[in-house]
Image: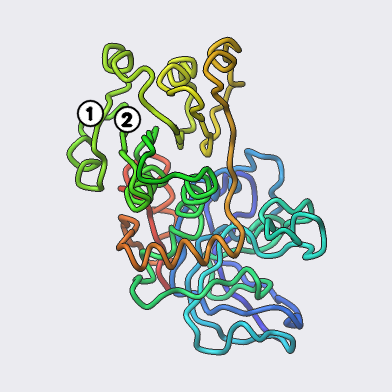
Amino acid sequence: MAQFHGLAAHAAGAELLPYHYDPGKLGAQEVEIAITHCGICYSDLHLISNDWGISQYPFIPGHEIVGTVAAVGSDVRLHKAGDRVGLGWQSNSCGECEWCMKGMENICPASEATCVRRNGGYADRVRANARFVIAIPEAIKSEHAAPLLCAGITVYNPLRSHGIHPASRVGIVGIGGLGHLAIQFARVFGAEVTAFSSSAGKEEEVRALGAHHFVNTRESKAMKEVAGTQDFLLTTINADQDWGTYIQALRPTGTLCFVGVPPSPIALHAFPLIAGLRSVTGSPIGSPHMLREMMDVAARHGVKATTENFPMSKANEAIEKVKKNKVRYRAVLAN
């Protein structure tokens, strides 16, 4: 009988404790990954606390997984034992619906998450459908690849699908785990990049990451000065804001795109949207195809997550650091 070993929460908000489980027989279309690295995403913290009401315990978090293929199911041709691979938020889809057939598996109604109602990557092994297991290019270190599998694709997908190009003026709101990667990808697409942050001390860092401009969002004068300057605003923050100010920052036909989830409903006046053909949208993770493309782009253009590494055994300490926003910019656990 196979045994997978990991760190699990046994109740909402509880600290993680050693836990083992029998994964059952390897499915014909599944890949088993021996995990070397797993990023800590803020979604893991929400799942540990059952903030979204979808967690089941005991529960092993983790969905920014890098490792080597340990075994493959009888129908798998994409991967072989020993390949270095990654697994992100999604681990399966129906493969047959309208969205899967369009290559948009990330919005499949029957989508399966890597660590929702199943055990994730704070462990020694994990399994997933082979279609969602992504080869990692040699040019990217495993610790830098792990955060790309969720944080990276979460910002790459909207920039790519909204057609960001060298004439685009792109603003990134919030410079943390997602924002520091969004700046790099927006630069790769050739855009003029403005970083919006409430932390004035981050200006030097964001310019080093590739931002052309920095706006301190605590200064109303600075926010007024950027009115009508942005084609695309990507907001990565999980805090309430005066969203009308950001709509005012958009040029005509501009878009405000949410990948972070503010706690309160978003209140906006319709007139600036109507008058300037402006739009408000959101974006989830990307499809397996988009994940593979993003990894290739990151490898070729040197996009990488800024990481702080912890042994897997210190997961609880790492989680506390992430909760207190003391990690720049992504925590990664290593086996």
The quarter in which the N terminus is drawn is: bottom right
User: What secondary structure is marked by label 1?
Assistant: helix
User: What secondary structure is marked by label 2?
Assistant: strand
Left or right, 60 with reference to 152: right
* The quadrant where residue 62 appears: bottom right
Left or right, 157 with reference to 304: right
Residue 214 placed where, x, y %? Answer: 25, 31
Residue 192 placed where, x, y %? Answer: 31, 39
Foreground of the two, 105 or 167: 167
* The quadrant where residue 18 appears: bottom right
Q: Is residue 167 above or below residue 71?
A: above
- Do tag 1 and tag 2 residues touch (Cβ < 8 Å)? yes
Image point 59% across, 46% down: which residue? 284
Q: CA distance from mark 1 to mark 2?
A: 7 Å
Label 2 belongs to which residue?
197
Q: Is residue 247 above or below residue 282?
A: above
Residue 104 placed where, x, y %? Answer: 68, 56
For label 2, the crowd category at 10 Å Cα-Cα, with few meaning under 14, some 14 to 19 and many 20 or more, is many
Looking at the rendered structure, the kind of residue marked 2 is: Ser
Residue lying furthest front:
167
For label 1, the crowd category at 10 Å Cα-Cα, with few meaning under 14, some 14 to 19 and many 20 or more, is some
* The quadrant where residue 261 appears: top right
Image point 43% across, 58% down: which residue? 147
Looking at the rendered structure, the kind of residue marked 1 is: Ala
Image point 30% across, 63% down: which residue? 302
Q: Is residue 9 above or below residue 124?
A: above
Say which mark, if any, is on residue 262: none
Foreground of the two, 127 or 13: 127
Label 1 belongs to which residue?
200
The quarter in which the C terminus is drawn is: bottom left
Foreground of the two, 257 or 112: 257
